[in-house]
Image (tube, rainbow, N blue to C red):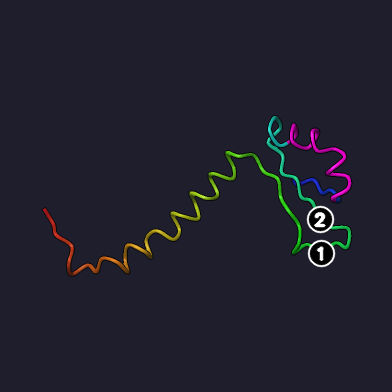
Amino acid sequence: MMKHYSPETAQTDLMELLTAVHQLKETIVITPTDANDAQAAVLVPKSEWEALRELAFLQQSPLIVAESQPTTEVEWG
């Protein structure tokens, strides 16, 4: 479950939020006071961020390989 904070509250409680993210593996959403969700920021544990980056890379990787190396030129053996 994600917890939502305003920028002002997040600034005031930054150390508490960092502890929650680090120790409890919580996800924190900081949404502007005008509730414009497109401008929100998300705090996640570093391990989760790295996993998301790796997943994004792996999802793109087959497309790059397929374009750069046609199957007719692959050597077997």
> Is 10 included in the stretch rendered in magenta?
yes
**Residue at 64% across / 39% down in the picture?**
45
> Could you say which disc has been placed on residue 31 in the image?
2
In the displayed structure image, the side of residue 50 where residue 61 appears, left or right: left
**Residue at 44% across / 61% down in the picture?**
60
Q: Amino acid at mark 1?
A: Asn
In the displayed structure image, the side of residue 34 where residue 42 appears, left or right: left
The x, y position of residue 74, in whole percent, is: 18, 62
**Residue at 49% across / 51% down in the picture?**
55
The secondary element bearing badge 1 is classed as: loop
Looking at the image, which is closer to me, 22 or 7?
A: 7
Q: Is residue 18 above or below residue 28?
A: above
Q: Quadrant of residue 26?
A: top right
**What are the residue bounds of the magenta stretch?**
7-20
User: Is there CB contact under 8 Å for labels 2 and 1?
Assistant: yes
The x, y position of residue 76, in whole percent, is: 13, 57
Which residue is labeled 1 in the image? 36
Q: Amino acid at mark 2?
A: Thr
**Residue at 70% across / 45% down in the picture?**
43
Structural crowding at the residue carrying mark 2, measured as other residues with C-alpha within 10 Å and reported as few (<14), some (14–19) or many (≥20): many
* Mark pair 2, 1: CA separation: 7 Å
> Could you say which disc has been placed on residue 55 in the image?
none
